[in-house]
Amino acid sequence: MTTQAEDLLGARVTGADGKVVGTVEQVFRDDVDGTPAWARVRSGKTGRFVPLGSAKLTAEGLQVPFDAQKIMGGPNIDAGQHMSAAQAEELSRYYGLIVPTQQARGRMAEDQMAREQMAQQDQTTQPDQMAQQDTMAQAPMASGDWLVRQEERISVDKEMLETGRVKLHKYIDVEPIDQAIHVFHEEYDVERIPISADEGISGNIQEGEQELILHEERAVLHKDVVPVERVRLRAKRVEEDSTIHDELRRERIEIEPDQAFSGDQQHHL
């Protein structure tokens, strides 16, 4: 990537799965050519690193060819203001990149110089010396030459695998309720009171009427929708120790003396 580091700061980082991982918090340059090589992506309180070799800077932000789960599962490295060669090599192994570290590049340069010097010496070698070297190369191994004993060494790495998926689904449940409430209603009652002659009430015979309005209370139900809690899914990282089982091979060199002189003795190296 030939983009300047200043253009990457604050850019939104989007993974290969289309998910936004976070924003670029810091950019680390290559120790050899000075180009931007790694970016620290800030997502909440977490910071992870992404390689910039295959990243693309667009109008929407920085797009990287790794999904969000791969990025957030990367090594937790405290690089400070400068990333060491060992830290860059660890990140390169995690992302499957063949990126030589600063020491490896130095060794490559030294090897290239050595090859050039050997080529110059080969051009100035006399024909008789070249013939002597060819003869020595074609000669069979003498009895005093070395045997090389080899053995396998184990190197353990880690990979991110999908183990399952969990979904949240919101359903509507109907729950019957019974709630007691005290109400009243009115009923009519006829009240009769006799009138005595002493009260002096008199009048004409005529029709009349009286109207009474009756009332009652009825329960009225009101429903309100109120939020009660927030629910979401998130991945929780659980650290654990795991043991791998395999086999390692190694070569063994044995001394096999002449049976006529040494009997059945054998020595192991």
Image (cartoon, grey):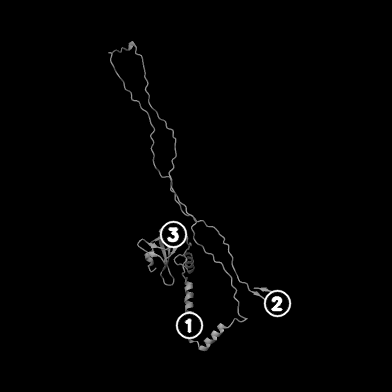
Q: Residue furthest top?
A: 197
To which residue does mark 2 refer? 259
Question: Earlier along the polypeptide chain: callout 1 or callout 2?
Answer: 1
Q: In which quarter of the image is residue 6?
A: bottom left
At horizontal 48% and vertical 75% (from top left) the residue drawn is 108
User: Label 1, label 2: how many angstroms apart (C-alpha)?
Assistant: 49 Å
State if disc 2 and disc 3 touch (CB < 8 Å): no
Q: Position of residue 45 (x, y in %)?
A: 44, 57
Residue at the image point whose x is 44% and y is 63% from the top: 49
Find disc 1 in the rendering and name its residue: 119
Residue pictured at 49% horizontal, 77% vertical = 111
Circle 3: residue type: Ala
**SS at circle 3:** helix
Q: Mark 3 points at which residue?
A: 68
127 in relation to 187, above or below:
below
Q: Find residue 62 and name its label.
A: none
Of residues 35 and 119, the one drawn nearer to the viewer in this rendering: 119
Disc 2 on helix, strand or loop? helix
Write the residue at 47% across / 78% down: 112
Q: How crowded is mark 3: few (under 14 residues within 10 Å), some or many (20 or more)?
A: some
Residue type indicated by callout 2: Gln
Among the two numbered marks 1 and 3 on one chain, the one whose residue lies closer to the N terminus: 3
In three-dimensional space, the C-alpha distance between marks 3 and 2, rounded to whole angstroms, equals 68 Å
Q: Which of 113 and 82 is in front in this view?
A: 113
Mark 1 or 2, closer to the camera: 2
The amino acid on which the numbered mark 1 sits, given as a three-letter code, is Ala
Residue 36, placed above or below residue 204:
below
The crowding category of the residue bearing disc 1, from other C-alpha atoms within 10 Å (few below 14, some 14 to 19, many at least 20), is: few
